Image: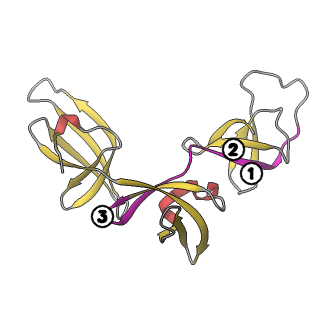
Amino acid sequence: MPKINGNEIRPGNVLEHNGGLWAAVKVDHVKPGKGGAFAQVELRNLRNGSKLNERFRSADKVERVRLEQKDQQFLYENDGMLVFMDAETYEQIELPADILGDRRPFLQDGMTILVEFYDNEALNATLPQKVTCKVAETEPVVKGQTAANSFKPAILDNGVRVMIPPFVGPEEDIVVNTETMEYAERA
C-alpha cells in the first residue's frame, strides 16, 4: 500500500492508522507561528463508526488504503440487515441497515448502490446522488407567496421531511439530492 505524507491527506481518503481503517472526514492545515505546520484530521472508523482527531506533521508517513468499489443491487431487508446482490457474479451480501445512516429511507427496491470493499469486507455504502420520490403531503400554496426563495415543508412517501418550492403539490414526483437531503428538481 502506498505511504503518503501527513500533509497530503485529503477528505475522503481511507487510511490505515492505529491498527484500524479510518476515513478522513475533515482536514484542516494549520501553520502556527511557532513550530512546524501540521494537518489536523478528523477521522471516522469504517468498522465501528467511532471518531478520532489526530495531528499529522508533514514528516509523518501514513498508509493510504484503496478500497475496491462494486455496484450492488438492493434486494430486501431482513432483521435489520440489508441484502444486496452483485449484478455480475450474483453473489449476495448482507450489510447492517445503519450503514446508510439517515439516508436509509431513500433506499428503494432494485436500486443499485456503490459498496466499498477491503479484502472482501464491505465497509461503506453510497446511494446514488439523486433519487426520485413522491410527495405524500404538503401545505397548500399561500396566495401571493411568490418570493424567489420561499419553500414549504413536505413529507415524502418514505417519511422524510424536505422543503419544496410552492409550485410542487401532493402526489408529484420530485428528485431529492441524497447528500444534502434537499429538493433538487421536478421528476
Q: Taking 99 as reference, is 182 left or right? A: right
Report which residue position mark 2 lands on.
Answer: 162
- The residue singled out by tag 1 in the image is 156
The residue sitting at the bottom extreme is 79
Q: What residue type is labelled 1?
A: Leu
Q: Mark 3 points at which residue?
A: 119
The residue sitting at 71% across, 25% down in the picture is: 149
Q: Check the image and report above or below for 17 versus 42.
A: below
How many neighbours does mark 3 have within 10 angstroms: few (below 14), some (14-19), or many (20 or more)? few
Q: Do the residues labelled 1 and 2 touch (CB within 8 Å)?
A: yes
Name the residue rendered at 17%, 46% in the picture: 2
**Badge 2 vs badge 3, beta-carbon distance below 8 Å:** no
* Quadrant of res 39: top left
Say which of marks 3 and 1 sits in front: 3
Colour option used: secondary structure
- Chain-order first, disc 2 or disc 3: 3
